[in-house]
Amino acid sequence: MSKEQRPLGLRITHNPRPYSGPYGRFALVSARGVACLKWRVLCSVDGVSMYSSLWNRNRVMIRALQMIVLLAFVLSPLQWSEAARPNFLVILCDDLGYGDLECYGHPHIKTPHLNQLADQGIRFTDFYSTAPVCSSSRAGLLTGQTPNRVGIYDWIPEGHPMYLKKEIPTIATLLGNAGYATAVCGKWHCNGEFNEPTQDQPNHNGFDHWFATQNNASPRHENPVNFVRNGQKVGPLEGFSCQLVTDEAIRWLKHQQKQDSEEPFFLHVCFHEPHEPVESPDDLVAEYRDVAENEDEAQYFANVANIDLAVGRLMKTLDELKLAEDTLVVFTSDNGPETLNRYRTANRSYGTPGPLRGMKLHIYDGGIRVAGIARWTGTIEAGQTPSMPVCALDLLPTFCNLADVEIPKSVSLDGTDITAALKGGEVDREQPLFWHYYRAYSDPLVAMRDGDWKIVAHWDAPHIVKSGGKFGGNVNAETQKLIKTAQLVKFELYNIAEDIGEKNDLTKQEPERLERMKSQLVEKYQRVQSAGPVWDTDEYWEARQRPRKK
C-alpha cells in the first residue's frame, strides 16, 4: 500500500506491541518504511512458559496456523498506521493576534513561510487557545485539560506558588514514556519558582531537554541573559529571542536525529514574540516604516515578520533532515493580541484580532480565537480551510491517538481527538469547548462553544478588573474564594458562523437553545469549579508587602 493510499488512523506501531489471542501470540515490529510480522505460539510445558517457533513445524500445521492468525487479524481490533509513529512539532507564539498573519488577512505584514505552511496543510479558521491569558493557556495545551481544572488560574508571577504539577500528565510525559524524545525551547511560564527545587520544572513535566525562561526573555528580547538550559544558567546571549530559540531547537533536533534517527520526537517551540517589550531587527523594521503609522507599529510588524523567518528556518531543517513526511507541525498562539498601551511597556503592541470582538484577557473570541495551522506532508491534504471549532486542548488526545499512546483513564480530558479533522472530516466532540478566566477584562468571564453557537456568562461575584484593585493583582486567597464559589447569573448567545464579531445577542430569539446551552454551561462550570485546587498564597503576598531592604 502506498503512502497516499494509507488511511490515517490505521497504524503499525514503532515499538513491538504483542497481541495475545486464543490461537497464539504475535507482535508487529516496524522500522521506517519496513514492517514485518513475527508470530509465535506461547506453549506451556509442566507450568513453564516457552516460545516455540512456528517455522519448525510441519507445513500442514504451519498453513493451518497461518490461516488462523490471518483470521485473527481480520477479526481483531488491531490498528495500523504509518510505518513509524509521527513526530510532533508545536510552535507557540505569545500574544499573536488572529489577524496578525498575511494568510489571516493582515494588509501589511508579510509572512511567506507561514503562508506556505498553511498552503501545504490546514489553515483552521476557528482555532482556539485554551485561555485568554498566558500561563493558563500553556498549561491547557500541554495537559488537554481546561486550565482551571489543573489550578493554573492566571499568568504566573515570578515566585508565585502556582505551578503545573508533575502528577498531571502532559503531552511530553505521555509521549516520553512511550519512547519519544522530548524538548521545549523558549517561554515556559508554567511555574513561579523557575529553576528552583521547590517546584516542578520542565523536566518534571516530561521534557528531556529544556532551554527556557520563566516568563519574558529579559532584560529585553534582544540579547537576553535569563535563559536556562537543563537547570544551568546560560548567561548573556546575542540576538533576538525567537531566533535564539530556533537556534536551540535546530541544534537539539539535529543532535537527536544523529543519536537515533528512528526515535520519534515531540519538540515544543515557544516564542516570546510578539509579546512586549517588542524589539525587532533593524532591517525588518525598515521594510515597514512606509506602511506603519509610526515607529512603534513598524517594530510590531517586523516582530511578526521575524517569527515568520524563524518558522521558515524550522521548516527548512525538517526538509534537510528528510522529516517533513514524518512530522505533524502545528503553529498557533497562546491567546489574542495585547491591547495597545494597556500598561507602560505595551506601547508597541499593535496586534489585531481582525474581525473578532475583544483582545487578550477577553472571553469574547478576540481573546481566545487564534491562528491555527497544521501540516503533515503527504498525509494531510494541502489547502484545507475548515471552519469547525478546534482547540489547543485537542492536541494531547490527537497526538496520543496518532502515536498509539494510552491516556490514563483517571485524566479528565476537556479536549477531543481531532484526527478526523486532519483527514478533512468532521470532529465528533463529546463535550463543547469551555473557557473561564476569573480576571477577564470583558464583562462575561465564562464561555462555551458548541458547533456554530457560543454562549458567554457573567458571575454573581464582583467584576475583579472593575473593582479598583480591591482583589489584588493575581491569584490570592480572596480571588480563589470567588473562583470556587461564584455562580453564573447572566448569559449572552451568539451564532459565530453568522456573527463573527459577536455583535448580535440572540438570547431573546433563541430561548430554547439558550436554556439548553445554559444548562450545559452551568454543569460544566460547576464540575471544573469543584476540581480546581486551592493554592496557599499567603506567604507569597505577605513577602511582597514587606518593605524592601536597602
Image (spheres, grey):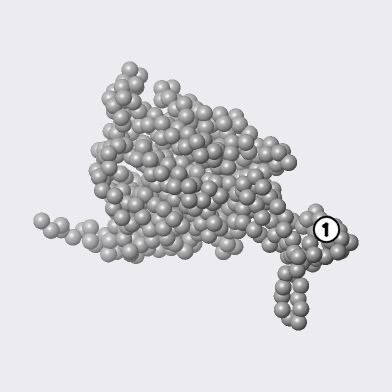
Looking at this rendering, what residue extends furthest in the bottom direction? 46
Residue at 57% from the left image edge and 31% from the top image edge: 120
Which percent across, then down, holds residue 447?
50, 46
Q: Residues within 10 Å of mark 1 (few under 14, many from 20)?
A: some
Q: Mark 1 points at which residue?
A: 66
For the residue marked with disc 1, what is the amino acid? Answer: Gln
Direction from residue 130 to residue 220 in the image, left or right = left
Residue 14: in sight, yes or no?
yes
User: Please, what secondary structure does the residue beneath circle 1 have?
Assistant: helix
Direction from residue 501 to residue 310 in the image, left or right = left
Position of 311 relative to 174 (above/below): above
Residue at 46% from the left image edge and 26% from the top image edge: 112
Which percent across, then down, holds residue 11?
67, 50
Number of marks in the image?
1
Looking at this rendering, what residue extends furthest in the top direction? 290
Position of 195 relative to 89 (above/below): below
